[in-house]
Image (cartoon, helix red, strand yellow):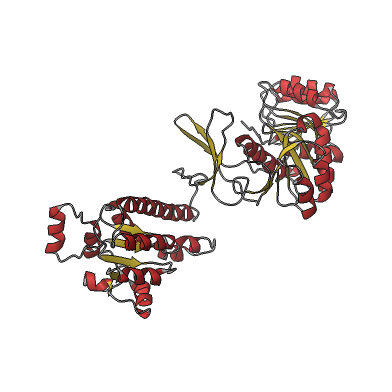
């Protein structure tokens, strides 16, 4: 590769730029610079330095909006050295070659992080000349090195010194790929931030844009013959959780941890969830975290073995002592006391995750040929929006149990049935092809007495048989969305059996 003879430096992040410029000039490189970068380099006594206006023969204007957008800059970057007609053209117009472009962009994301930033401020912090130069240099990567990160300055100077002022073709190519990624990320940040600004009546984007960094290579996916990795969009939620202890996480661990974490997020009181294969086998809320875990565990202690846990409070020593009594795969919680960590880390393989809360993002599922996207199911039921459909209204205790069971049903695979008491799940029927079978499975799974429990159903009962089956096991009240063509028959069955029945008007399918 030929020696770098001229470099254009125009950076928002001034970190290391003076030392980088000084090293370039020591190698005989002429520098062209703009605005604030030029002033810093000049004040630092950097030699071989020209202002960009001396190249364009045109002053900076429009409050700095126009500085480098000029044929004398673009031509110097884009001219292909291997094409005689390109070289003749720039020579004819007196355009100097630019061999290295060092640019980083206006800090749009820093401004955008302020949710109250006015639109005018956001617009003014959208860089135009910077992305133009970056993309131009990356397009002509064979001849021009493009530098977008101060982190690369040191290694580039070392290579230039070792190679008589030139960079290898591999270095040019790697810098170009990084430059295109930088430009793409910048445009994406602008697109996503402006999409939040009204007027907009689109609950979901017209273009699905998912950007996440691979944060963890997994041993395999759901099964050993499938490859898998975790990609995180930030440092919140299960994907961005900090693993404090235990062996490496598996694909299935992460899926179950997310299911457990989302379930505990439904509750205001201290709550615990035990998950197996994405379904809750136990869930409870109570005055203390220890008691909530004890009640969740007793709902199905056999299934809890080898399960995944989540808590909506920091795990304390008393709760940790209860957890330590059985084999658990992984735990997600906002934090852990020092005493709890001492107890839990005694279990060598137990995975402990500290999770920062985050707003739920749109739900994305891949299908052959594309993706399905939906807004997250964040509906919170209020008693005022329900309708009592039976002759008998629920008692206060039944209301409490119905509301609790309804929260859990939202997190059970359809067809979903939950038997519950106030603050405690008793039996869960999940994923059956008929609703009456889910009623039967939920009763079959129950370890605790079913007499006096209530029943929550994620969707309507198509026939009275589901309610009739549940009544055999001693339930006293039912909560369901309603909406079946046979609602009248289902309500009549409830009245005949002495049950209270509440309609929510909201369905919670979970496929």
Instruction: Report whether 203 appears left or right of 179.
Output: right
Above/below status of 24 relative to 287: below
Q: Residue at x 78, y 50 (%)?
A: 342
Instruction: Report whether 300 appears left or right of 92.
Output: right
Above/below status of 8 relative to 330: below
In terms of image quadrants, where is residue 275? top right
* Residue 126 visible in image: no
User: Residue 271 at what x, y percent from top left?
Assistant: 77, 45
User: Residue 261 at what x, y percent from top left?
Assistant: 68, 43
Instruction: Report whether 501 appears left or right of 202.
Output: right
Above/below status of 475 relative to 149: above
Q: Nearer the viewer, residue 368 or 133?
A: 133
Q: Nearer the viewer, residue 115 or 143?
A: 143
Instruction: Report whether 38 appears left or right of 383.
Output: left
Q: Residue at x 25, y 61 (%)?
A: 3
Q: Residue at x 79, y 23 (%)?
A: 444
Q: Residue at x 45, y 62 (%)?
A: 108
Q: Name the image quarter holding the C terminus.
A: top right
In terms of image quadrants, where is residue 157? bottom left
User: Residue 113 at what x, y percent from top left?
Assistant: 53, 60
In terms of image quadrants, where is residue 94? bottom left
Above/below status of 116 relative to 216: below
* Residue 89 visible in image: yes
Q: Name the image quarter holding the N terminus.
A: bottom left
């Amino acid at each position: 590769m030929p020696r770098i003879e001229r470099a254009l430096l125009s950076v928002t992040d001034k970190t290391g730029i003076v030392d980088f410029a000084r090293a370039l000039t020591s190698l005989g490189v002429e520098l062209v610079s703009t605005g604030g970068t030029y002033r810093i380099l000049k004040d630092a006594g950097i030699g071989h330095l020209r202002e960009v206006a001396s190249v364009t023969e045109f002053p900076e204007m429009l409050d700095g909006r126009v500085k480098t957008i000029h044929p004398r800059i673009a031509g110097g970057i884009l001219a292909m050295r291997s094409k005689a007609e390109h070289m003749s053209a720039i020579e004819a117009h007196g355009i100097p070659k630019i061999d290295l472009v060092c640019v980083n962009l206006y800090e749009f994301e820093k401004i955008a992080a302020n949710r109250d930033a006015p639109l005018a401020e956001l617009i003014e912090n959208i860089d135009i000349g910077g992305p133009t130069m970056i993309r131009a240099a990356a397009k002509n990567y064979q001849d021009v090195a493009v530098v977008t990160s101060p982190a690369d300055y040191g290694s580039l100077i070392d290579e230039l010194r070792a190679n008589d002022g030139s960079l290898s073709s591999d270095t040019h190519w790697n810098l170009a790929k990084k430059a295109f990624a930088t430009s793409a990320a910048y445009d994406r940040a602008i697109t996503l931030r402006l999409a939040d600004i009204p007027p907009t009546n689109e609950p979901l984007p017209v273009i699905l844009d998912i950007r996440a960094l691979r944060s963890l290579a997994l041993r395999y996916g759901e099964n050993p013959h499938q490859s898998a990795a975790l990609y995180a969009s930030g440092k919140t939620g299960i994907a961005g959780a900090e693993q404090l202890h235990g062996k490496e996480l598996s694909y299935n661990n992460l899926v179950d941890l997310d299911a457990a974490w989302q379930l505990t997020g439904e509750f205001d009181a201290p709550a615990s969830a035990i998950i197996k294969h994405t379904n809750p086998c136990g869930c409870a809320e109570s005055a203390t975290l220890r008691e909530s875990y004890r009640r969740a565990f007793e709902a199905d202690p056999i299934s809890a073995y080898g399960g995944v846990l989540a808590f909506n409070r920091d795990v304390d020593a008393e709760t940790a002592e209860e957890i330590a009594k059985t084999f658990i795969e992984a735990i997600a919680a906002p934090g852990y006391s020092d005493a709890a960590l001492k107890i839990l880390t005694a279990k060598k393989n137990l995975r402990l995750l500290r999770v920062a809360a985050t707003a739920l993002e749109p739900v994305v599922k891949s299908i052959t040929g594309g993706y399905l996207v939906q807004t997250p199911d964040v509906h919170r039921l209020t008693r005022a929006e329900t309708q009592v459909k039976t002759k008998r209204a629920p008692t206060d205790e039944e209301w409490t149990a119905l509301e609790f069971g309804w929260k859990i049903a939202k997190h059970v695979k359809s067809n979903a049935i939950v038997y519950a008491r106030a603050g405690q799940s008793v039996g869960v029927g999940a994923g059956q092809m008929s609703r009456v079978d889910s009623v039967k499975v939920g009763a079959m799974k129950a370890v605790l007495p079913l007499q006096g429990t209530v029943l929550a159903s994620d969707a309507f009962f198509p026939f009275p048989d589901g309610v009739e089956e549940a009544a055999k096991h001693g339930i006293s009240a039912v909560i369901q969305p309603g909406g079946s063509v046979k609602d009248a028959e289902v309500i009549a069955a409830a009245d005949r059996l002495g049950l209270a029945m509440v309609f929510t008007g909201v369905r919670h399918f979970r496929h």
